[in-house]
Image (cartoon, rainbow, N blue to C red):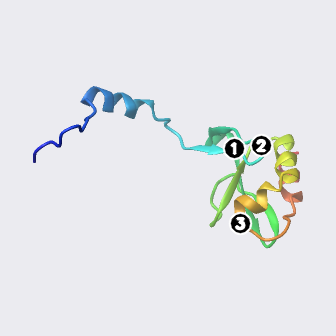
Amino acid sequence: MACRRGTVYACPDEVRRRRRERPAEPVRTCVGCRTRTVASGLLRVVAVDGTLVPDPRRRYPGRGAWVHPDIGCLRLAERRRAFPRALRSAGALDIAAVCAFLT
C-alpha cells in the first residue's frame, strides 16, 4: 500500500517510549478536589437506594465516583454537589455511611 503525501509516521523508537510513559495503574479524578490520582489512592463510592456507600474492594456494580479517603475531600464534594452529578442520580445522597467508614 502506498504512502500518502504529507503523512507523518511515528518512528518505532517514539512509539516504544510512549508505551513506557503510560502509568501502570488507572488514573481517576477525585470528585472533591478534582485532582487526578492513581486509583489505588482513592476510595470508590456508589449510590445504593439514595445512600452513598463506600466500595473499598471495588466490587459493587454500576457507576461509581472516586474520592480521596479524607473527610475534607468528602465534605468538599458534598458542598459542590458532586456526588449526584458524578453518579447521575436525582436528589441528594446521604453520606453518613462514607463518613463512618473514613473515621
Instruction: Give the residue type that dot 1 points to.
Output: Leu
For image coordinates 71% across by 56% down, the residue present is 55
**Cα distance in 3D space between marks 2 and 3:** 21 Å
For label 2, the residue is 69
SS of the residue under disc 2: loop
Residue 69 point in image, percent of width and height: 77, 43
CA separation in Å, label 2 and label 1: 6 Å
Where does the C terminus fall, quadrant-wise?
A: top right
**Which residue is found at the position 79% from the left and 73% from the top?**
49
- The location of residue 37, given as percent across then percent down, is 64, 38
Taking the view exactly as shown, the residue that stands out farthest to the left is 1
Residue 63: name its quadrant. bottom right
Whether tag 2 and tag 1 are in contact, CB under 8 A, the answer is yes
Q: Which residue is mark 1?
A: 42
Asked whether 64 or 3 is in front, the reply is 3
Residue type, numbered disc 3: Arg
Q: Report the disc number at residue 88.
A: 3
